Image (cartoon, rainbow, N blue to C red):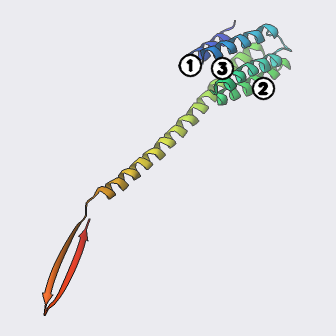
């Protein structure tokens, strides 16, 4: 098993342990291994192998609901590069290097987008909390009313002023 495959499996194992999807992870690893056996690394097999690995990853995503954006990005990159190997436009070594580079870039971009969305949601949540606190403070602030009565020529006038 090449280094890229071992790194991928290691990352998925760590992710699955953290997410609690160990059984699905094992199924995906077995499916990906089957793809590697059925489609060994040789020109003409790369694209079929890529489609097989894509199917294994999407089955995992479907079963767990985790990582769809990442799986989509990997599949798109893997499919594009595997076609180039099958056409003889790049070598296996170039394929491996470009996969690492392009998947790393895509992963960083997706992670940054997710972090930005979480940040924006936290900001929105904090604005809601702040507004709720202000509203609560206003409703809890006691008011006082001062009234004064003035009597003149048998007529009483009462004036009241309310203060926050």
In the rendered image, residue 64, in percent from the top left (x then y), is placed at 64, 24
Tell which tag, 2 or 1, sits nearer the viewer: 1
Tag 1, which secondary structure? loop
Cα–Cα span, label 2 and label 1? 32 Å
Q: Mark 2 points at which residue?
A: 80
Image x and y of residue 104, in percent: 62, 24
**Image quarter of the N terminus:** top right
Q: Earlier in the sequence, mark 3 or mark 2?
A: 2
* Between discs 1 and 3, the one toward the N terminus: 1
- The image quadrant of residue 95 is top right
78 or 118, which lies in front? 118
Rate crowding at label 1 as few (under 14), some (14 to 19) or many (20 or more) other CA atoms within 10 Å: few
| Residue at x-position 72% and y-position 22% | 59
- The tag on residue 20 is 1
- What residue did someone put label 3 on? 100
Return the x and y of residue 80 as percentages of the image width and height.
78, 26
Dots 1 and 3: beta carbons under 8 Å?
Answer: no
């Amino acid at each position: 098993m090449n280094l890229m495959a071992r790194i991928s499996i290691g990352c998925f194992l760590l992710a699955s342990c953290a997410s609690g999807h160990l059984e699905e992870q094992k199924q995906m690893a077995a499916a990906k291994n089957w793809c590697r056996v059925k489609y060994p690394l040789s020109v003409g097999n790369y694209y079929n192998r890529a489609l097989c690995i894509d199917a294994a990853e999407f089955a995992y995503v479907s079963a767990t609901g985790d990582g769809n954006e990442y799986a989509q990005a990997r599949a798109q990159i893997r499919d594009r590069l595997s076609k180039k190997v099958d056409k003889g436009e790049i070598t296996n070594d170039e394929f491996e290097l470009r996969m690492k580079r392009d998947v790393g870039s895509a992963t960083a971009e997706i992670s940054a987008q997710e972090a930005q969305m979480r940040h924006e949601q936290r900001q929105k949540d904090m604005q809601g909390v702040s507004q709720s606190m202000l509203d609560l403070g206003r409703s809890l602030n006691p008011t006082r009313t001062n009234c004064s009565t003035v009597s003149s020529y048998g007529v009483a006038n009462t004036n009241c002023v309310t203060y926050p």
